[in-house]
Image (spheres, rainbow, N blue to C red):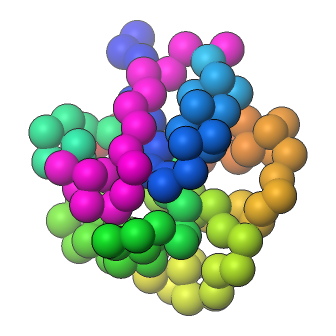
Amino acid sequence: MEKKRILIADDEELLRTLLPEALKPYDYEIDVAENGVEAISHIEKKSYDLIITDYMMPEMDGLELTRRIKAKYPNIPVLIITAYGPVHDLLKCGATACIMKPFDLLELQDMVETILDEAPRP
């Protein structure tokens, strides 16, 4: 079976390092982007089974990134990480789920697994 592909978009270097490590035991193929603009560039070159994005990022925030993903790739689930985010607005724009900072890594792992298990294959 083909590995599931995840793109992580976050402007914080710590999270761009920590999240792939936390998901390593699941043997996903993981790419990282520093912001929404870079994330869009990745998505245009490769298909992903899940996008994990921070809400607050320079150049393009997670809300705009989600809008653009959903407009062009409506079947890709988006998990938004937020400390401040308007969760209702994020979900209304097409986010599959939101997780609030600070979060427990086990909660994140479970959420990622659930989303990927429920998502239709592209």
> Above or below — where is 13 with respect to 28?
below
- Examine the rendering and report whether any part of residue 59 can be seen: yes
Q: Residue at x 55, y 14 (%)?
A: 27
- Quick one: quadrant of the C terminus? top left
The answer to whether residue 117 is magenta is: no
> Above or below — where is 118 with respect to 78?
above
In this picture, residue 114 sits left or right of residue 102: left
- Residue 70's spot in the image, x, y percent? 31, 69
Q: Which of 101 and 108 lies nearest the eye of the viewer?
A: 101
Q: Residue 18, located in which quarter of the rendered image? A: top right
- Residue 112's spot in the image, x, y percent? 63, 41
- Examine the rendering and report whether any part of residue 50 can be seen: no
Q: Residue at x 38, y 32 (%)?
A: 31
Q: Residue 5, located in which quarter of the rendered image? A: top left
Furthest toward the left, the residue is 45
- Residue 83's spot in the image, x, y percent? 72, 71
- Quick one: quadrant of the N terminus? top left
Q: Residue at x 30, y 52 (%)?
A: 39
Please report the bounds of the magenta region as a residue range. Answer: 25-41
> Above or below — where is 93 with respect to 29?
below
The answer to whether residue 38 is magenta is: yes
> Above or below — where is 63 with respect to 22?
below
- Residue 13's spot in the image, x, y percent? 55, 42
In this picture, residue 35 sits left or right of residue 102: left
